[in-house]
Amino acid sequence: MVDNFTDTAFWNERYLDRNYAYGEKPNNFLRKHLSLFNSGDDILSLAEGEGRNGVYLARYGINVHAVDFSYAARDKARELAEKHNVLFPYEIADLSQFDLGIDKWNGIVSIFCHLPETLRPHLYQSIRAALKVGGLFLLEAYNPGQLEFDTGGPQDISHLVPLSELMTAFQEFQLIVAQEIEREVHEGQYHNGLSSVTQFIVRKR
């Protein structure tokens, strides 16, 4: 087993299992705030994985564009999309080098995407530029408090996302949700139990 959390081979190996590693149901935080998005919106989903969130959004008429660096994840996402009679583009790319575009998206979604802290500032800059005016950035991620729990996510603090970092990176955006909380997360085999998460939604002014 490859044990580097940011290594493509690690994720390809994890996703080769026929079961969906993080389940087939969408993330609860995303589902709770679905009403912030509209049918026909162009939404970019970062580190989409096996498709559970992209499929959920697409079922509501949202134009999803997924990106991840795992071919195995993309293949399973396509199977899940076919199961639910939806279709959306899924691009294989390294997020540290991926071009998000300029004024392109009505929303960008990041669910448990854990880049190293050295790479996140560039990604935040790209997100700020890529959103249209009025566009939303929605994120849920494990924060440093998650090291106290054995319930999912990376065990390297440099990959965990503190709220303060996001508040600084998006200080010019309209704040909708910004909190660090402990909540029960039950998503497939690898996210299970009480967890310490950052939840964040902002709108570009």
Image (cartoon, rainbow, N blue to C red):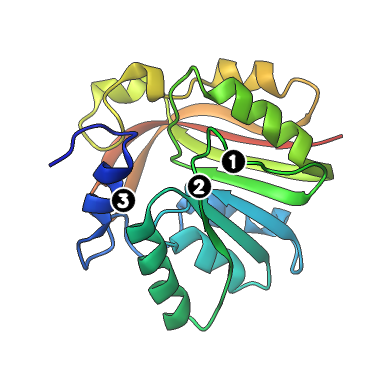
For the point 54% across and 24% down, the residue is: 120
Q: Is residue 174 visible?
A: yes
Residue 203 place in picture, x, y as percent? 77, 38
Q: CA distance from mark 2 to mark 3?
A: 27 Å
Query: What residue occupies the far left of the structure in this picture?
Result: 1
Which residue type carries mark 1? Answer: Phe
Residue 107 place in picture, x, y as percent? 71, 49
* 149 or 126, nearer to the observer: 126
Taking 22 as reference, is 204 above or below it?
above
Which residue type carries mark 2? Answer: Ala
Taking 16 as reference, is 199 above or below it?
above
Q: Are marks 1 and 2 in contact (CB under 8 Å)?
A: yes
Which residue does the numbered mark 3 point to in the structure image?
Answer: 186
Foreground tag (2 vs 3)? 2
Q: Which mark identifies residue 30?
A: none
Q: Which quadrant does the C terminus fall into?
A: top right
Residue 193: quarter of image: top left
Secondary structure of residue under mark 1: loop
Which residue does the numbered mark 1 point to in the structure image?
Answer: 98
